[in-house]
Image: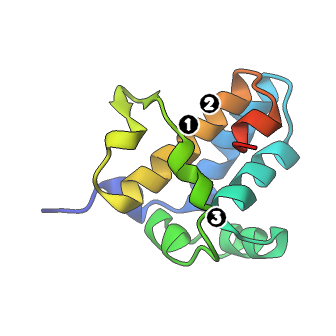
Amino acid sequence: MTKHRIYTMSFASVYPHYVAKAEKKGRTKADVDEIIRWLTGYSQEDLEAQLENKTDFETFFAEATQMNPSRALIKGVVCGVRVEDIEEPTMQEIRYLDKLIDELAKGKAMEKILRK
C-alpha cells in the first residue's frame, strides 16, 4: 500500500491555509497555534521550528511531544469521513487537526474546541 500524499507534504505548506481559514472567520493565528499545541504537545518554539524546517506531516505527528489524550473526544465528519472511525493513526491525527480548525472557523468557543 502506498502512503497517502499528505504524509509527505510539508506541514508548513498547509499551515497558512489553517490560519487563513481561521482569520476569514475572525479568529487568529494565535488561536490556530493554541489548537496545534494542545493537540501535539509542542511548545510554541518547537512548533515554529517544525514550520521553519518544513517538516512533513508524518514526521510532524511522529515527533509530537505528547499527543493530547483528550483528542479521542474529537468526533465528527471531515471530508465525508468520521474522524473517530479512521483506522490509520497518522491520518486520524491529521483529520483531528482538520476537525479542530473547522470548529475554530465555525466560531466554537476555545474551551469546547480544546475539550475542557
Query: What residue appears at the point 35 percent right and 25 percent down from the top-left corner?
Result: 80
Instruction: Please state which amino acid type lies under the numbered disc 1.
Output: Lys
* In the displayed structure image, the side of residue 88 where residue 58 appears, left or right: right
* In the displayed structure image, the side of residue 112 where residue 71 appears, left or right: left
Seen from the viewer's position, the closer of residues 100 and 24 is 100
* Residue contact at pointers 2 and 1, CB within 8 angstroms: yes
Quadrant of residue 111 in the image? top right
Instruction: Please state which amino acid type lies under the numbered disc 3.
Output: Thr
**SS for dot 1:** helix
Q: Which residue is denoted by mark 2 in the rendering?
A: 102
Q: Disc count in the image?
A: 3
**SS for dot 3:** helix
Q: Which residue is denoted by mark 3 in the rendering?
A: 40
Q: Which mark is residue 99?
A: 1
Indicate the colouring scheme.
Answer: rainbow
Which quadrant is home to the N terminus?
bottom left
* Mark 1 crowdedness (10 Å alpha carbons): few <14, some 14-19, many ≥20: many
Quadrant of residue 50 in the image? bottom right
* Residue contact at pointers 1 and 3, CB within 8 angstroms: no
Seen from the viewer's position, the closer of residues 68 and 21 is 68
